[in-house]
Image (cartoon, rainbow, N blue to C red):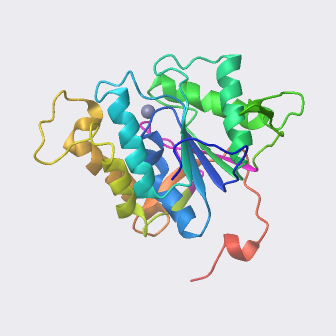
Amino acid sequence: MKRQPESLSEKVYALAFGAHPDDVELACGATLLQIMNEGLQVAVCDLTKGEMGTLGTPETRKSEAETASVIMGYHSRMTLDLGDAKLFYTEDNLAEIIRCIRHYRPEVVFANPPDERHPDHLKASKLVTDAYYYSGLQRISTMMNGTAQEPFRPQHLLYYIQFKHLEPDLIVDVSDTFSASRKGILAFSSQFYQEGVTQEPKTLIKRKEFLTGLEARARYFGEQIGVMYGEGFLHPGPMAIKSFRTAFPGF
Ligand SMILES: [Zn+2]
């Protein structure tokens, strides 16, 4: 796993954005493992360092994100510094995200959901949605390591589901990867409940019940499609079906 990109571009199949380090692992980690199990590469981009979080320091969160990336097996992880709790919709912030999309040239982009409790998640969702579109425009120029980037628009955009309950448009069967994804989540040890460790200060996600709640939701989504665990996603607009047999397999 590379910490920060060195080359001009490195194509991956999926690029998952999160407002904070751990957003991606919590909301769609099992799906990313599923994608990698199919032999496809995944990169993650955290828009902020999570420096305003109640728990952990920017340094601990950085090293936790690196550990999580190794455990998960990502191709690479890019950490932008767009300002935790100051993640504003600016031309500069938009350009940073466009730069990241043009660097990784993914087919699928994952983003924070458009309806959420944390204001940073909402702002990240809007920024990534717009950058997803603008990254394909010829006349928006961006540079990476001193070289002009080629325009590139990914094929698909999916929103994962976080704190708020949203009705998913699609549910991924993650029965095979759900337990492994928990290891990626627990790499963010400053944020979550740890057996035998002082649990102060208390936050919503530090409670032991939080992780149980995540599992309950994955079971609930799984139940909706007749499997053990599922992760739900929102899809902007109708989904195209190119192979009927693949979309509707038999038993
Ligand atoms: Zn977050």
**Residue 144, quarter of picture:** top right
For residue 48, side relative to residue 243 (left or right): left
Instruction: State the image coordinates of residue 29 (x, y, percent, origin top left).
Output: 46, 53
Residue 78: image location, x then y, percent: 56, 39
Q: Position of residue 194 (x, y in %)?
A: 19, 45
Magenta region's main secondary structure?
loop
Residue 2 at x, y percent in the picture: 53, 49
- Viewer can see residue 237: yes
Identity of the residue drawn at 43% across and 54% down: 70
Is the residue 203 above or below the residue 68 in the image?
A: above
Vertical side of 50 occupied by 76: above or below: below
Q: Is residue 217 left or right of residue 137?
A: left
Closer-to-camera residue (165/96): 96
**Residue in front for this viewpoint, 148 or 180:** 148
**Image quarter in which the C terminus is found:** bottom right
Specify start and end residues of the magenta stretch as a single range: 155-170
Q: Quadrant of ligand 1?
A: top left
Residue 234: say if magenta: no
Residue farthest to the right? 139
**Is residue 168 part of the magenta span, yes or no?**
yes
Q: Which residue lies at the image location 68% right of the left edge and 19% below the top edge?
A: 92
- Residue at 29% x, 30% y: name it: 56
Question: Taking 118 as reference, is 103 above or below it?
Answer: below
Judge from the rendering whether residue 149 lies leftward or rightward of residue 115; answer left or right: right
